[in-house]
């Protein structure tokens, strides 16, 4: 099963969640109705006993309960619309400064950046829960654009690099498999159910204050009624808690096994994540989180954040460990609270890079890493598909090598507001000398001398680098760009648009790069949520697929019309065989940028499996020669990111060699 299928399952689980939620509401309405009948009988007793059936009471119970739960859930959902950052700060998290010099924070940031490059997603913001000594972590957000990774201080300081990498890989699995959006929805919906318990507590406190403040018979009677109502609502709230626990357990437990397995697949190191779980078992605080909001967010965490319960959101710790280490004998060693230091880090886990440019040995990309040249990566179609359907150890190694071998001043540029903007400008400069000179002159007029000088320097260095490096640099720059002010972001966007249009020609990579940057940053500045699904079948997007595939075929074979037709036919045949859809070929006049923009917007509103079919077709459209050049890889990954489906770099995976 690949990312796309997992995302489709997560999307469909939302329907199951709604069914569970509705059943919970019906149960709570029945309990409220019973409470209302009991209170009415208490206030006006009838000799024949309480009236068990009263349509008017049932109506008001249902309307009142439904409205209260709906309003509470809507309030919480709107509160969480800010994405993962809202969750992280609500849990007491502190965002780590990307320029930190602290050993533990720098090591954590490096691991997150490496994993982001390996998986093709923007680098998430990283938060640490300073007051939590236990070992735990979470990923939160509506989309990869607003995702955050949070860890407890114990997780950051007590784990070795390999163990911490296993935990981070586990959390990235949740990001890539589409679990985060489901988790956010779960938090919003369940708050409405649990809100009744909060109302019960408020009413209960009011009854005690009322009873103490009034000695009159009427006041005491009212206090008694409030006491009964408060206790009843509190009990009903526990009914809601029961349903909430049941829903979270049913949605979360199997996904934790899957995320553990994915972490092993990504890193090819079961001892890493297993070591983190063993340390949880040997630590007196385990994985428990003390923050009050942990109850609402318990299903987000790497380990069980709450005390054991009948409906635990996570599988038992021994069961998770045995799946990773079948020969484990069931013994935990006491875990020391002494933080891992740089000197005590196991040698095999230490960073190997020196921050200087080089060409690392990466499987499948020899001699192509920092400089693209004229080479191309030989890939069969099956290898290409496998390369972007999941993250493989080769891609994790690529992410680590890329990150460690970037020149220091490139990384420093991506971590400053001025430098990150300059890096994006440098990637967008035209290839020919005349247009580049004109664009640099425009930048000098519209920015300042320092920015102009930095862009001029960077553009000469990055213009020939491989696509994996270009997209990795964008992913590294995005977290910094999220910290622009609103006015700075508007100015940055205007400069990008004018820069792209300055030579009177917009090539497809420039267009895609603009879409990637604005789509990810708009999630922060415009508070845009995920696209609403409008297309569930490829058949409804025949013409749009024709525009995209015809364009890519033409871009890959600009001088050979016959090769364009052959490349398109190969992609079209695959989609006909796998989805039963005939894709029409589109001429150059039918594939303008407006048509491409509209087509990609429609695919962004399609299901994960429809996106998967398009990306398979895109790969075949540019791989008629069974090779992927750096430019072709740029285009495919840019198309994927622009439809909300970032994919890992193309590599040759040992699984298919």
Image: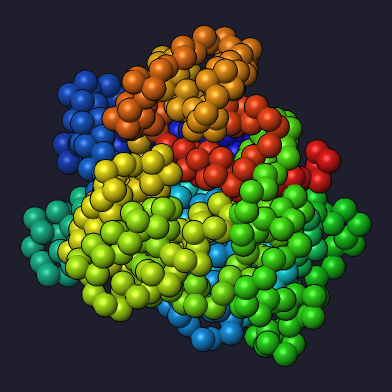
110 versus 47 height, above or below: below
Asked whether residue 453 is in view, the answer is yes
Question: What residue sits 68% from the left and 76% below the top?
Answer: 353
391 versus 425 height, above or below: above
Question: What residue sits 22% from the left and 22% below the top?
Answer: 54
Question: What residue sits 38% from the left and 74% below the top?
Answer: 454
**Which is nearer the eye, 292 or 500?**
500
Asked whether, in this view, residue 264 is left or right of residue 128, the answer is right
| Quadrant location of the N terminus in the rendered image | top right
Report the label total.
0
Q: Position of residue 110 (x, y in %)?
A: 58, 71
68 versus 325 height, above or below: above
The answer to which image quadrant residue 271 occupies is: bottom right
Q: Where is residue 607 in the image (x, y as percent from the top left)?
A: 46, 28
Asked whether residue 429 is in view, the answer is no
Asked whether, in this view, residue 132 is left or right of residue 197, the answer is right
**Which is nearer the eye, 87 or 401?**
401
Q: Position of residue 147 (x, y in %)?
A: 44, 55
Question: What residue sits 68% from the left and 30% below the top?
Answer: 625
184 versus 36 height, above or below: below
């Amino acid at each position: 099963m690949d990312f796309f299928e997992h995302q489709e399952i997560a999307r469909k689980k939302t329907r199951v969640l709604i069914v569970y939620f509705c059943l919970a509401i019906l149960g709570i309405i029945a309990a409220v109705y019973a409470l209302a009948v009991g209170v009415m009988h208490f206030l006006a007793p009838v000799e024949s006993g309480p009236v068990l059936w009263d349509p008017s009471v049932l109506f008001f119970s249902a309307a009142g309960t439904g409205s209260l739960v709906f309003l509470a859930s809507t309030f919480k959902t709107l509160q969480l619309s800010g994405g993962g950052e809202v969750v992280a700060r609500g849990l007491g998290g502190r965002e780590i400064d990307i320029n930190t010099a602290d050993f533990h924070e720098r090591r954590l940031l490096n691991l997150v950046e490496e994993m982001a490059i390996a998986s093709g997603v923007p680098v998430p913001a990283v938060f640490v829960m300073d007051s939590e000594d236990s070992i735990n972590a979470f990923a939160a957000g509506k989309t990869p654009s607003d995702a955050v990774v949070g860890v407890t201080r114990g997780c950051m300081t007590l784990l070795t690099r390999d163990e911490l990498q296993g935990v981070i890989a586990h959390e990235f699995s949740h990001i890539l498999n589409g679990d985060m959006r489901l988790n956010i929805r779960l938090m919003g919906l369940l708050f409405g159910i649990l809100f009744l318990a909060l109302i019960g507590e408020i009413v209960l406190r009011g009854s005690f204050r009322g009873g103490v403040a009034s000695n009159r018979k009427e006041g005491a009677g009212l206090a008694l009624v409030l006491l009964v109502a408060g206790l009843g609502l509190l009990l009903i709230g526990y009914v809601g808690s029961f349903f909430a626990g049941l829903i979270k357990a049913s949605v979360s437990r199997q996904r934790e096994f899957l995320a553990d397995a994915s972490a092993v697949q990504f890193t090819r190191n079961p001892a890493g994540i297993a070591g983190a779980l063993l340390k949880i078992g040997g630590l007196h605080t385990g994985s428990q989180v003390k923050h009050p909001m942990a109850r609402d967010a318990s299903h987000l965490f790497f380990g069980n954040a709450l005390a054991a319960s009948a409906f635990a959101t996570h599988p038992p710790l021994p069961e998770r460990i045995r799946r990773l280490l079948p020969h484990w004998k069931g013994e935990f060693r006491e875990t020391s609270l002494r933080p891992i230091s740089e000197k005590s880090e196991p040698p095999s886990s230490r960073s190997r890079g020196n921050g200087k440019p080089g060409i690392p040995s990466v499987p499948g990309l020899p001699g192509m890493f920092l400089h693209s040249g004229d080479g191309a990566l030989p890939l069969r179609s099956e290898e290409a598909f496998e390369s972007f359907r999941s993250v493989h150890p080769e891609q994790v190694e690529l992410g680590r090598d890329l990150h460690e071998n970037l020149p220091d001043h490139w990384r420093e540029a991506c971590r400053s507001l001025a430098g990150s903007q300059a890096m994006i400008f440098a990637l967008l400069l035209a290839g020919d000398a005349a247009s580049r000179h004109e664009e640099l002159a425009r930048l000098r007029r519209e920015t300042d001398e320092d920015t102009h000088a930095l862009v001029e320097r960077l553009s000469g260095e990055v213009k020939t680098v491989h696509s994996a490096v270009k997209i990795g640099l964008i992913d590294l720059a995005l977290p910094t760009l999220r910290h622009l002010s609103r006015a700075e972001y508007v100015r940055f966007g205007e400069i990008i648009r004018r820069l792209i249009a300055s030579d009177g020609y917009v090539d497809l990579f420039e267009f895609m790069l603009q879409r990637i940057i604005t789509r990810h940053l708009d999630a922060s500045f415009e508070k845009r949520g995920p696209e609403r699904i409008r297309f569930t079948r490829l058949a409804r997007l025949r013409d749009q697929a024709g525009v995209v595939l015809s364009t890519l075929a033409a871009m890959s074979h600009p001088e050979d019309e016959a090769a364009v037709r052959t490349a398109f036919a190969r992609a079209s045949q695959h989609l006909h065989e796998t989805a039963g859809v005939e894709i029409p070929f589109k001429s150059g006049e039918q594939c303008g940028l407006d048509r491409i923009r509209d087509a990609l917007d429609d695919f962004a509103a399609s299901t994960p499996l429809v996106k998967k079919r398009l990306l398979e077709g895109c790969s075949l459209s540019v791989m008629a020669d069974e090779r992927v050049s750096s430019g072709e890889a740029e285009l495919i990954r840019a198309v994927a990111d622009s439809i909300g489906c970032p994919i890992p770099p193309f590599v040759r995976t040992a699984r298919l060699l």
